[in-house]
Amino acid sequence: MFTKKEFHLIPKELFLDLSYPKEAPGWIENKYFPRTASRTKGNSHVSYTQDLNIPDSNSNLRQNFTVISSKSWREIESSGYGVYTYEDTSVLSLSIENGIYQVTVTLGNPSNQNYSCYIRANQIIKIDSILITPNNLKSVSFFVPVYQNQLELAFLFGNYASLDSASVIGDVYLSSLIIEKNIIKKSNSDTAKSKPTIFLASDSTVQTYESVYYPQTGWGQVLCEFFTEKKQIMESDCNSCPYPQSRIYETEFVRIENRSIGGRSSRSFLEEGKLDSIILDLRPNDFLFIQWGHNDATAIRPNRYVNASDFQTYLLPYYQACQLTGAQLVLVTPAARRNCDEQGTFQISFPEYRQQMIAFSKKYKIPLLDLGKYSTEFLNTLTPEESKSVFMWLSPNQYPDGAYPDGLSDNTHLQQYGAMVFADIIAFLICHYTEDTTLDPLKPLVRPIEISAIPKPPRFTGNTKSIDPTMVTGFAVQEITKDESMGNFLLSFQEVENAVAYQIYQKEKNDITYHKIKKISCEEKKNAVTLPFSAKCGTIYQYYVTAVFSNGTEGRSSRILEIDLS
């Protein structure tokens, strides 16, 4: 084990060969199976340069380089929802002590043409689009949390964001590599801070929303309301987090950092490097609350999907991250959806994932807050009609100046009232947790209230719009995110009586003609209130939807949505 290691020519025996030789099996029983990686001990993509003929003016390049070749390409499965990047290369693989490491790579270019490359660390993209000009060196640095005693580094030719189905093949030249442990130093404010920090990692039921989406609210957005007596809450951007949905809330008792982001699962949050970002900020005595399950169960989105039997595998890195940093992991079972049976009784949502989380809690002795159970019990105190006030059920023209002027019927996402109720339940569960002493530091700080004291949304009594009965209403976009070179978002709309399908149209803003991009069956619409879509980044798109009837005609189109992926 080492605290600092420096390489110039990297020994070939430290590499393994990575490839994806077999085609993806594809969709089998409504689940998508991508290509499987082949990882073998070897270095078939590694070589060294010898005695390069470099002009005297560039004598700094009179050296040998470790040369790593690679072939990279991207495949999109047939529905368009699953995007996979594959790379044939040799990967540097080191057994290493757990910790936070700074990796500094010096790249060279002994050729007479520019080239670009990107770097992965433990399968996560760390830096993309590194441009190295001819006869020059370039150094880049990044941090890597290692919590499974393994560091793998891949140095890959090309720009990751612009990969497509055409293979990109080329060489990357390494001049030196420095790996140094525990390079992050705590600031005085870190060591002196008296307030605990609660980090939240979850999905759209927890994330913070901009005011244009009101009344849509995640419970993480209002959890701070139950950690204050003075009702003086300071809100700020999270400068160390790369996505805008993250927000910091600070009261006189606690600091809450909401890193939740819509459309993510335990798997995709990890694979996108978002857990790594949290790890770099976690300190001893902090708390990391995670709620997963909603998107893990969505088989139609292969990049998110986690089979319930594999759920604990993806929970484990969150536990290991807390073990590494001295923070305390707290499990939160999936918040209830509005899914009542014919008798009006609400059932626990995602029960298989909840059970896996309970089993994981017992196995590793991790505190668990059973929001799934208690939020379901709360819904069962309401009638199905009354429960609409908890979720995003809005009438047309109820919020004419926001993101949902045509109304919405959404059984998953929360109105502000529902978010307050669910956050209050979290506060109550913290206060009454007795399994061990791990949550004792939070108990004196939390202030749950009676749910009956939470104001309900006012009853809408205004006039709704008079509309054509064939028109699709409630057309809205949610959870716009950009991953790699693709933008991802959810579209939702109200069902139309007697429709047999729905047709989605798209065009780039500056184009004249709309194109049909997807037909949604009535069955698909009934099974998913929100529908996932993807489009290439770099432009602004416009969308509308029509109802399709049994005679082949289409009803009046919805309003036009503009989605900025530029």
Image (cartoon, rainbow, N blue to C red):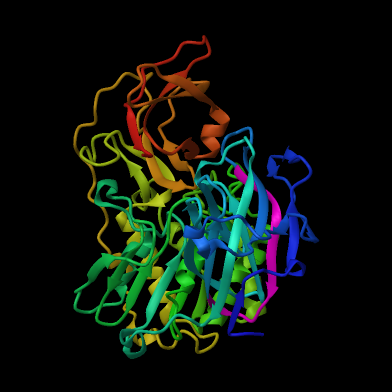
The picture places residue 356, in percent across and down from the top left corner, at 65, 65
- Residue at (52, 70) in percent of width and height: 104
Residue 165 in view, yes or no: yes
Number of marks in picture: 0
Residue interval drawn in magenta? 83-101
Q: Nearer the viewer, residue 145 or 317?
A: 145
Viewer-proximal residue among 521 and 34? 34
Judging depth in this view, the residue of 95 and 412 nearest the camera is: 95
Could you tell me residue 402's position as x and y percent?
24, 42
Residue 94 covered by magenta stretch = yes
In terms of depth relative to the viewer, which is nearer, 409 or 14? 14
349 relative to 547, above or below:
below
The quarter of the displayed image where residue 421 is located? bottom left
Q: Which x, y percent locates residue 391?
A: 38, 50
Which image quarter is the C terminus in? top left
Q: Quadrant of residue 287?
A: bottom left
Whether residue 559 sits left or right of residue 383 in the image: it is left
Q: Quadrant of the N terminus?
A: bottom right
Q: Residue furthest front?
A: 56
- Looking at the image, residue 468 sits to the left or right of residue 309; the answer is left
Q: Is residue 347 visible?
A: no
Main SS category, magenta section: strand
* Residue 516 position within the rendered picture, expressed as x and y whole percent measured from the top left: 48, 20
Left or right? Give the position of 440 relative to 518: left
Q: Residue visible at 56% across and 74% down? A: 178
